[in-house]
Image: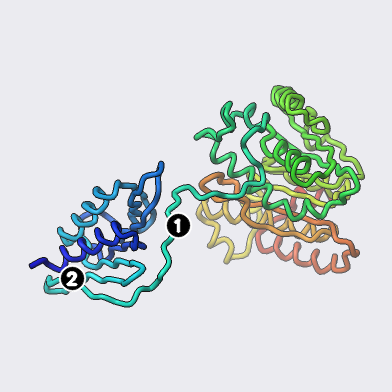
Amino acid sequence: MTTPKENFIKILQDSLAADTFIKVNLANYHGTASNLKKLLIKKVIIKKKVNLSIVYRYLTNDITKNFQLDEGVKTIASYIDKTDFRHANLFTINKDYQLQCSKKGSWKIFENKASSNELPTTSHDKNKKRNIVADGKQYLYDLKITDAQGKVRPHGQDKYKQINHYIEILSKLLKELPKEETVQIVDMGSGKGYLTFALYDYLLTVLKQPAIITGIEYRKDLVELCNSIAAQSNFDKLSFTQGSIENYQADKNLDMLIALHACDTATDDAIYKGIEAQAELIVVAPCCHKQIRKEMKKGTASQAVQHVTKHGIFMERQAEIITDTLRGLYLEQAGYSTKLFDFIATEHTPKNIIIIAQKRKEAQTNKEEIATKIEAIKKSFGIEKHYLEELLN
């Protein structure tokens, strides 16, 4: 006579063979692995072969391992046989099965009505719609994101995701730009031009929007590299100019100003240039917040704030929050509506906040109210001055 544990594994094998299997979960862990909580098992297709994907869920992270079917079933059976996991749930399109171990060590198996009658997708690689398609893009190859066949290189995956997420964030705003006109865009501190090229590509090939984009970069070698890549890609209205953000004079007809990861007060210089040029859109992803951190250290903050910021790491985080909060308020005071949110997941970049400011069509009427908020924040945190405020004054 088979035991409940053996019976459970037999039902699992039969469901896989009959293609009625949905998933298996193992829980109530009593093994020796530190912080392991449960196993989550599903079927996936990898290189046209059926595999079992097992997610090892720990207290602070997940680890995924893929096994051929027989090996995966043996792994599950081993955990159950050693009583490492004392609770197992098997879901099929016909029935659900529960395997449980009592406190006294006896096993029982229970049958229940199927939770779902639909088989899940077994695709291992999700087909995501990308705004920037990798295949056939000269600039992606020149920037070493793709290989000669147009396939994204392993080391280029994060940058490729970042490019597409950036375009996804901006896509709705870009569609609102005047179609009948050539839009003027400046990218302050364009660096190697990853996002500058992607933006021009999206406007040109997807939105069919005439655009002139200028990248401003201080490093001469990067300016020469980007101009060379733009020429090879036949991006006639995309160019790069050597210079600093502080000294650049933006055109009054500017539609959009971008500054991604401009360090410390260079972000404020970029915001100021955008406001000065009355740009319709200002998009910045701040990097470093040293100026306000120094102000907070030398100033006299409220007692509650002093308790919060006595540890260096909390001082740093608080300075970042206050710096960008004030930037948002200064932009509102200048007649912009603002949004602050995550740029991209932190595993791709630690510089993770993006500020999007859109010029209001109506006049700003609550400037005094905003000024009161700004002064209250500065007083609470012992801040005498914000660099952007000095520029605007």
Is 39 situated above or below 388? below
Q: Residues within 10 Å of mark 1 (few under 14, many from 20)?
A: few
Secondary structure of the residue carrying numbered label 1: loop
User: Could you tell me if residue 393 is visible in this image?
Assistant: no
Say whether residue 324 is visible. Answer: yes
Q: Quadrant of the N terminus?
A: bottom left
How many labels sit on residues? 2
Q: Residues within 10 Å of mark 2 (few under 14, many from 20)?
A: some
Which amino acid is tagged 2? Cys
Residue 115 position within the rendered picture, expressed as x and y whole percent measured from the top left:
38, 73
Mark 1 vs mark 2, CA separation in Å: 31 Å
> Residue 283 at x, y = what percent?
74, 49
Q: Say which amino acid is labelled 1.
A: Thr
Q: Residue at x 63, y 60 (%)?
A: 301
| 118 on left or right of 152 | left
Name the residue rendered at 89%, 61% in the picture. 361
Q: Nearer the viewer, mark 1 or mark 2?
A: 1
**Which residue, given by chain and number where applicable, does mark 2 sit on?**
101
* Residue nearest the observer in this picture, 252 or 201: 201
> Is label 2 in a helix, a strand or a loop?
strand
Q: Is residue 359 left or right of residue 19?
A: right
Residue 75: percent from left, percent from top: 23, 52
Give whichever of 183, 350 is nearer the camera: 183
Residue, disc 1: 121
- Residue sticking out furthest to the bottom: 113
- Residue at 33% x, 67% y: name it: 91
Instruction: Please give the name of the residue rendered at 39% of the width and 54% of the height, measured from the top-left corner.
Output: 61
Hey, which residue is sitting farthest left in the picture? 1
**Picture coordinates of residue 159, whole percent (x, y):** 58, 39
Q: Earlier in the sequence, mark 1 or mark 2?
A: 2
Viewer-proximal residue, 44 or 101? 44
